[in-house]
């Protein structure tokens, strides 16, 4: 696998592929910093990793067509945890070059109505991750 | 969703304007009033999985300028935002082009002026059409 230009990462929500209505995906996994600086730190701060967390940022195109995005990601899901799978590397299935990341995310906001006159109707979200993320390469 | 189908769909919509001859390709001879549908540019990869491409079309509406005042009156009518002779209204009359695209919008009429076709001068109005497919 070489460096790659993003043209088609795969995004599935609750088992439904919604990639055709997604323009950007960014999965971030972070750790808190726990300060363990003491008198022996030589004048520098020292940190160790604390609790991990994650989030998934997505840019969507609203689409109310049959089976389209807004029939999958509905208002009823706000406040609930939903499994989302993202396959990197422009892949459509998990492999060493196109790993998949699976986790539950809290659907904390949606904007089914969005856009100014003349604009494509889009909206962006950042869903916080709940629990662990699983990486698969096959 | 093909470029040919989009072009044909825009032409079909324009043919609802009475008396306007519509060409999907640049014709050898122009008999005004006429509309010519041209593809300008394409923005690929606007969504994952080929979910969206954005096409920029220009529709040039040409009228004879033998009688200059009459020609300008015709262009006024074709440039109206609404009405039976409105090209904007006609193009947007079927915004999915019967399935050839997801949506379209006539963004603007950015230019009006002289155009030379086959060594003949005409007046023309250009309509910028953005197609999402």
Image: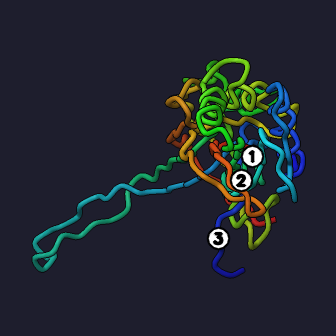
Q: Is residue A26 visible?
A: yes
Could you tell me residue B28's position as x and y percent? 87, 59
Q: In this view, does B32 lie to the left or right of A135?
A: right
Q: Do the residues labelled 1 and 2 touch (CB within 8 Å)?
A: yes
Query: Looking at the figure, which quarter contains the N terminus of chain A?
Result: bottom right
Q: Distance from label 1 to label 3 (Cα)?
A: 17 Å
Q: Is residue A48 left or right of residue B59?
A: left
Q: In this view, does B95 lie above or below B129?
A: above
Could you tell me residue A126's position as x and y percent? 50, 41
Residue located farthest toward the front when viewing the structure as drawn: B67
Q: Mark 2 lies on which chain?
A: B
Q: Distance from label 1 to label 2 (Cα)?
A: 5 Å
Disc 1 is placed on an element classified as helix
- Give the camera-side residue of A53 and A71: A71
Residue annotated with mark 2: B48
Query: Which is more N-terminal, label 3 or label 1?
Result: 3
Q: In this view, does A99 lie above or below B98?
A: below
Q: Is residue B44 visible?
A: no
Q: Which chain carries label 3?
A: A
Residue annotated with mark 1: A20
- Give the camera-side residue of A81 and A40: A81
Q: Residues within 10 Å of mark 1 (few under 14, many from 20)?
A: many
Residue shown at 53%/47% (left/top)?
A: A57
Residue annotated with mark 3: A5
Q: Which mark is residue B79?
A: none
Disc 3 is placed on an element classified as loop
């Amino acid at each position: 696998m070489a460096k790659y230009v993003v043209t088609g990462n795969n995004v599935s929500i609750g088992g439904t592929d919604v990639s055709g209505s997604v323009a950007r995906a960014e999965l971030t996994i972070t750790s808190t910093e726990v300060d363990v600086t003491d008198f022996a730190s030589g004048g520098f701060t020292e940190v160790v990793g604390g609790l991990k967390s994650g989030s998934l940022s997505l840019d969507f195109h609203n689409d109310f067509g049959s089976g389209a995005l807004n029939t999958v990601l509905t208002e009823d899901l706000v406040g609930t945890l939903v499994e989302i799978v993202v396959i990197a590397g422009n892949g459509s299935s998990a492999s060493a070059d196109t790993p998949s990341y699976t986790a539950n995310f809290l659907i904390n906001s949606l904007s089914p109505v969005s856009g100014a006159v003349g604009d494509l109707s889009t909206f962006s979200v950042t869903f916080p991750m709940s629990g662990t993320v699983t990486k698969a390469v096959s | 969703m093909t470029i040919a189908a989009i072009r044909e769909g825009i032409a079909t919509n324009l043919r609802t304007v009475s008396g306007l001859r519509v060409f999907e390709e640049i014709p050898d001879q122009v008999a005004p009033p006429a509309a010519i549908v041209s593809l300008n540019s394409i923005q690929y990869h606007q969504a994952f999985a080929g979910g969206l491409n954005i096409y920029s079309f220009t529709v040039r509406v040409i009228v004879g300028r033998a009688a200059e005042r009459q020609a300008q009156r015709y262009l006024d009518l074709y440039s109206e935002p609404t009405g039976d002779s409105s090209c904007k209204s006609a193009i947007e009359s079927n915004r999915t082009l019967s399935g050839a695209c997801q949506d379209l919008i006539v963004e603007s009429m950015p230019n009006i002026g002289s155009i030379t076709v086959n060594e003949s001068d005409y007046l023309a109005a250009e309509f910028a059409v953005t197609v999402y497919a």
